[in-house]
Amino acid sequence: AQKVTQAQTEISVVEKEDVTLDCVYETRDTTYYLFWYKQPPSGELVFLIRRNSFDEQNEISGRYSWNFQKSTSSFNFTITASQVVDSAVYFCALSEAIKAAGNKLTFGGGTRVLVKP
Amino acid sequence: NAGVTQTPKFQVLKTGQSMTLQCAQDMNHEYMSWYRQDPGMGLRLIHYSVGAGITDQGEVPNGYNVSRSTTEDFPLRLLSAAPSQTSVYFCASRRGLAGEGVQETQYFGPGTRLLVL
């Protein structure tokens, strides 16, 4: 069975500090996808990134970066020089990559990030 | 494109009442699904559909029914509402698998907040 663990329930930082969100996953599949979603206070879910299990390159997008380490089953997310607009709940999610899996995304419990001015 | 739309945004029900949460997408996505979000638990899959006329159960299907008569619409029915169904409900859609082992990104609607008294 798939499982995603986000051990940090809430992180509070001061603006311009860096913040790293941990995500650890479990799966027996050799092919899978990992995702990060952002949920701002307005409530919608915003897609941030998708990564497949064969691509372990780290990725950077502006102030966001992701560190995928298959050896430790982790897919951590770092926000550099945080801003107040980064305040949100961030979800890590895992999906199998076979047709029989249907539409299932397994989500972690989420990490609430609070960036104070 | 409007993307994924959901109505209503907010609903209050009394125990035992029935209602339908509406979901529509205009991206011609094959896959649609319903999740519920509860505090500290991330999102959990209720039902999903891999195409018109085909639906299947997710992780927490009890108390909910779905149907998929068209590609665009995927309504979620609560047959007899219970306080345990108080939650935020998200509808999501994505394209069908591009091939074995390729997973497409799911896009979420804005959510419906449901309160059952």
Image (cartoon, coloured by chain):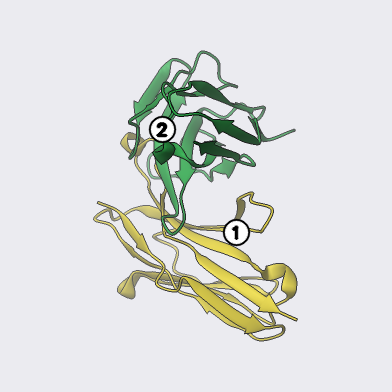
Chain colours: A yellow, B green
Q: Residue at x 50, y 60 (%)?
A: A91
Give the position of the C terminus of chain A as an image quadrant: bottom right
Q: Position of residue B87 (x, y in %)?
A: 49, 43
Specify whether B89 is left or right of B9. Answer: left
Whether residue A35 is visible: yes
Q: In the figure, A106 relative to A63: above or below?
A: above
Give, as a three-letter code, the residue at label 1: Lys
Q: In the figure, A78 relative to B32: above or below?
A: below
Mark 1 or 2: in front is 2
Specify whether B80 is left or right of A37. Answer: left
The image quadrant that residue A93 belongs to is bottom left
Q: Position of residue A44 (x, y in %)?
A: 64, 49
Specify whether A31 is left or right of B39. Answer: left
Q: Residue at x 48, y 40 (%)?
A: B86
Rounded to the nearest whole Å, what is the CA distance between mark 1 and mark 2? 29 Å
Judging from the image, what secondary structure is the residue with disc 2 in?
loop
**Residue at image mark 2:** B82
Q: In the figure, B57 relative to A30: above or below?
A: above
Q: Position of residue B60 (x, y in %)?
A: 34, 38
The chain containing the residue under callout 2 comes to B
Whether residue B98 is visible: no
**Residue at image mark 1:** A38
